[in-house]
Image (cartoon, rainbow, N blue to C red):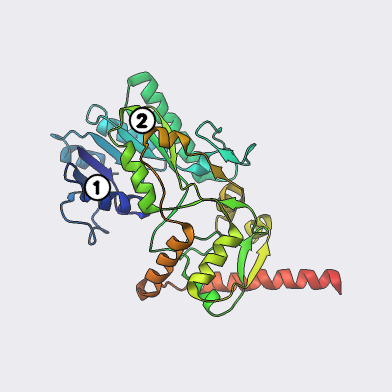
C-alpha cells in the first residue's frame, strides 16, 4: 500500500506513522516542511514542501499516485479545495481528520454516534471542521472523490498530560502546581463524563480504515470505550505525580468569561459537556479494533515521560498567575456571601 500523509508528526499522526513504518507492505510518504522529522522511524519517505505552496507540491507528486492520502493539518474548506485539486484522480482514498467537537453542542443525547447532528455554536474551530466535511461530502456525491472522514476526540500521547483547563504553553504548569501542593482548577463540578484516547489506540483504528472499501464515503469517530469523570482524570494525574489533589471547582461559564484564551470554545463547545461515544460503527468496519491503554495507565506513562524529559516542562507563569486570580476571586465571593 502506497500512502501519503500531509503532516505525519503530530500527536495523532505520529503514532500512525510509527505503526505503519513497522509494516512490510506499506510504502509511507510524509509531506511536510521538515521541521519535526528528526525522530521519524527508518524507512519513511519525506517529500519536503509547504502544502500551502500548491504549485511546488503539484510538481513533487507529478508522477505519483497513492492508495491513501490523509490530511492531518487542514482546518479550513479552502485547504480541502486545494487537496481536491492536487489529489483527485491520484488516490483511491482521501482521509480527512475532522473533530468530534463538531458534534451537536449541547447534545440532545449524551450518547454520540456518527448520526449525531453536527452543530457547534460555541467554537469556530469546530464550525470550520463542519464546513470542511460538507465540502468533501459534496465532492464525493457529485464527483466520486473517495473520501473517508475521521473524527478524533481527546487524543493524547506521552508528550503532554491531557487536561481540561491549561495555558497556552501546555500542561506542565498544572502538574507543577500539583507538585507544589497549590490548588488546581477543574471546570464545573468535575462530574461530567469524558473520553480520552491514547494515540497508539487511535492509530490502530485509523490503520484499519486505510484501504478499507467499506469506509469510502463514511464518517467514523475513533475513541476509547472508557468513560471517566474530570474528577477521576485529575485524581489519576495527582496519583501519577505521587501527590494529593487539591482541587477547586469553577463553572465553565465563569472560566470562559475570565480568560483571554478561547476557553469558550474548548470548554462550552467541548469539554464541559458529558460525552459517551458509541464505537459500534468503527468496530463493524475494523472488527479487530480495541483500545487497550487504560487511562490511568496511559496518564502514568505520560507523567513519567515528561518528568524524565525536562525540555517538555514548559513553565507558564501567566497561566499560573491567572489560576491564582480565579481561585482568589472564588474565595472572595464565598466570603462576601457568608460573612
Q: On residue 215, which mark appears?
A: 2
Q: Which residue lies furthest to the bottom in this view?
A: 180
Going from N to C along the chain, the mark reached first, 1 or 2, is 1
The residue positioned 47% from the left and 36% from the top of the image is 280
Q: In this view, does 244 lie above or below 271?
A: below
The residue positioned 35% from the left and 73% from the top of the image is 309
Residue placed most toward the observer, 238 or 253: 238
Position of 226 with respect to 43 (left or right) is: right
Q: In which quarter of the view is residue 180 placed? A: bottom right
Where is residue 82? Give x, y as percent: 31, 35
Where is residue 8? Give x, y as percent: 29, 50
Position of 231 with respect to 102 (left or right) is: right
Quarter of the figure that contains the C terminus: bottom right
Quarter of the figure that contains the N terminus: top left
The residue positioned 42% from the left and 36% from the top of the image is 282
Whole-angstrom CA distance, mark 1 to mark 2, is: 19 Å
Q: How crowded is mark 1: few (under 14 residues within 10 Å), some or many (20 or more)?
A: many
- To which residue does mark 1 refer? 20
Q: In this view, does 254 lie above or below 78?
A: below
Residue placed most toward the observer, 228 or 220: 228
The residue positioned 41% from the left and 27% from the top of the image is 137
Amino acid at each position: 500500500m502506497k500512502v501519503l500523509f500531509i503532516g505525519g508528526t503530530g500527536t495523532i499522526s505520529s503514532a500512525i506513522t510509527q505503526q505503519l513504518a513497522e509494516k512490510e507492505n506499506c510504502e509511507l510518504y510524509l509531506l511536510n516542511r521538515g521541521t519535526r522529522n528528526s525522530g521519524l522511524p527508518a524507512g519513511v519517505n519525506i517529500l519536503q514542501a509547504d502544502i500551502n505552496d500548491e504549485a511546488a507540491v503539484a510538481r513533487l507528486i507529478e508522477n505519483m499516485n497513492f492508495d491513501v492520502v490523509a490530511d492531518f493539518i487542514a482546518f479550513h474548506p479552502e485547504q480541502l479545495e486545494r487537496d481536491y485539486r492536487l489529489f483527485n484522480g491520484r488516490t483511491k482514498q482521501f482521509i480527512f481528520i475532522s473533530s468530534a467537537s463538531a458534534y451537536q453542542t449541547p447534545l440532545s443525547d449524551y450518547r454520540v454516534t456518527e448520526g449525531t447532528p453536527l452543530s457547534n455554536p460555541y467554537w469556530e474551530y469546530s464550525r470550520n471542521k463542519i464546513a470542511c466535511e460538507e465540502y468533501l461530502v459534496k465532492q464525493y456525491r457529485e464527483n466520486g472523490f473517495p473520501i473517508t472522514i475521521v473524527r478524533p476526540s481527546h487524543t493524547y500521547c506521552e508528550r503532554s498530560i491531557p487536561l481540561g483547563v491549561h495555558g497556552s504553553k501546555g500542561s506542565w504548569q498544572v502538574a507543577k502546581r500539583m507538585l507544589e501542593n497549590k490548588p488546581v482548577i477543574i471546570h464545573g463540578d468535575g462530574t461530567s463524563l469524558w473520553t480520552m484516547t491514547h494515540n497508539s489506540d487511535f492509530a490502530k483504528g485509523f490503520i484499519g480504515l486505510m484501504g478499507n472499501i467499506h469506509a469510502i464515503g463514511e464518517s467514523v469517530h475513533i475513541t476509547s470505550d472508557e468513560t471517566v469523570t474530570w474528577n477521576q482524570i485529575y485524581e489519576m494525574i495527582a496519583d501519577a505525580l505521587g501527590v494529593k489533589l487539591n482541587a477547586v471547582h469553577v463553572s465553565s461559564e465563569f472560566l470562559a468569561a475570565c480568560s483571554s484564551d478561547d476557553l469558550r470554545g474548548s470548554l462550552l463547545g467541548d469539554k464541559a459537556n458529558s460525552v459517551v461515544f458509541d464505537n459500534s460503527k468503527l468496530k463493524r468496519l475494523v472488527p479487530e479494533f480495541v483500545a487497550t491503554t487504560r487511562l490511568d495507565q496511559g496518564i502514568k506513562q505520560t507523567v513519567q515521560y515528561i518528568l524524565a524529559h525536562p525540555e517538555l516542562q514548559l513553565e507558564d507563569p501567566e497561566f499560573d498567575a491567572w489560576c491564582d486570580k480565579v481561585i482568589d476571586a472564588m474565595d472572595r465571593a464565598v466570603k462576601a456571601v457568608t460573612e
